[in-house]
Amino acid sequence: MVNICVPIKHLGAHMISIHGGLKYIVFILFLSFLSPISFSSNASKPIVVCTTTVLSSIVYDLAKDKVIVEVISSPAVCPAHYDIKPSDIDMFRSASLIFIHGIEPWINDLKMASGSNATIIKVTGPWNTPEKLREKYILIANMLEKYLKLNLTENLYKCLKAINETEEYLIEYSLDHGFKDFPVICMAWQQGFINFLGFKIIAVYGPPEKISMRQYENIVKNASQAGAVLIIDNIQSGVEFGEKLASTIGGVEVSLTNFPGISPELKNMTMVMKWNAERLGKAIMEAKLKGEINRLREEIKMWRMVTIVSSILTIVLLIICVSLILKIRRK
């Protein structure tokens, strides 16, 4: 708490003379004593820098206002493709502790440019299933306690309880919406979550920029043979490939996120999982409807062919009958 006093040199001479000089200063000091203006200093709080919103959301859930949480990369892009900014250097320089995934190729450059001596904690592996997310919360809680001497037992318990409740919700939602064994094509970064929900993954594709024409043709072939009409994309990897694939096979594309923060309500990964599941629920209804429409179109095509063939046969038979009648009459 800092009391603000107004130095005499900052008051103009005309103000001193008009308001009674010393009496004015005493009055200001009296007011500041009664209602001191305070600034909450963040300097005493450790700064925890995270490379992604996944990590920053976990740190915030665990530590709340005990630390200042800073995040580097936008949730809208893959951290492997992020371009560092001058402000990121300052962020690294002020960090007490740094959390990374290990997929960020720019970490060493940022550490060197900032001269940071902060400990860097690598939190590796996927995080988009309840099981993997629990592991991340436990690891990060342990690191915050170890390096920043924070007692996070109660908050960790609440976070793990919320993940368990989310897991129960997802299992029930999956059963209610027919996810089990529903055939899909899936982007690799969503594979773990889609397996957890019970979908039958027909084909998996990696980053779109690395997919060859031959791989694309194989995916289309597998989708057609298995009757897969749902393509599950990853927002951070781009959605153009999934949209093109859906158009080719007459399917539905749905894009999911692996990072909180792409919209204000998605504050952490439990919220992300529910949001993704609900998008899948809507998409699967659309895919089933589209699949039924495609089936009906194929039936219509078949019946058109049957009608054409029947018409041709009728005409042929009519010609034969007319020819026979003419022959009989001639006789």
Image (tube, rainbow, N blue to C red):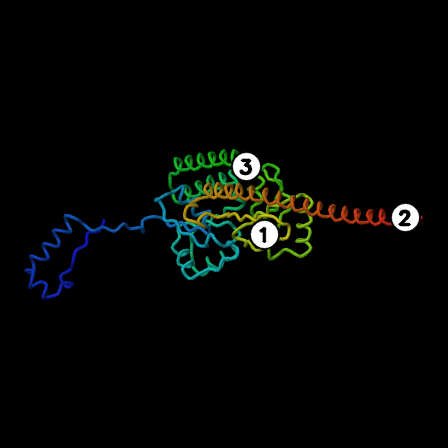
**Disc 3 to disc 1, how far (Cα)?**
22 Å
Q: Are the two marked residues, 2 and 3, in contact with CB atoms closer than 8 angstroms?
A: no
Identity of the amino acid at label 3? Answer: His
Identity of the amino acid at label 1? Answer: Gly
Q: Is residue 154 left or right of residue 207?
A: left
Residue 75, above or below 15? above
Within 10 Å of disc 3 (Cα), the crowding (few <14, some 14-19, many 20+) is some
Residue at figure coordinates x 18%, y 50% from the top left: 36
Q: Nearer the viewer, mark 1 or mark 2?
A: 2
Q: Nearer the viewer, mark 3 or mark 1?
A: 3
Q: Earlier in the sequence, mark 3 or mark 1?
A: 3
Residue 60, above or below 113? above
Identity of the amino acid at label 2? Answer: Arg
Q: Is residue 88 visible?
A: yes
Residue 286, above or below 85? above
Residue marked by disc 2: 329
Percent position of residue 27, x then y: 10, 54
**Disc 1 to disc 2, how far (Cα)?**
69 Å
* SS at badge 3: loop
Give the numbered dot on residue 280.
none
Q: Is residue 119 visible?
A: no
User: Given the current orientation, which residue lies at the most extreme bottom position?
Assistant: 13
Residue at figure coordinates x 52%, y 57% from the top left: 81
Q: Nearer the viewer, mark 2 or mark 3?
A: 2
Q: Earlier in the sequence, mark 2 or mark 3?
A: 3
Residue marked by disc 1: 242
Percent position of residue 151, x then y: 38, 38
Give the numbered dot on residue 177.
3
Q: Is residue 66 left or right of residue 176?
A: left
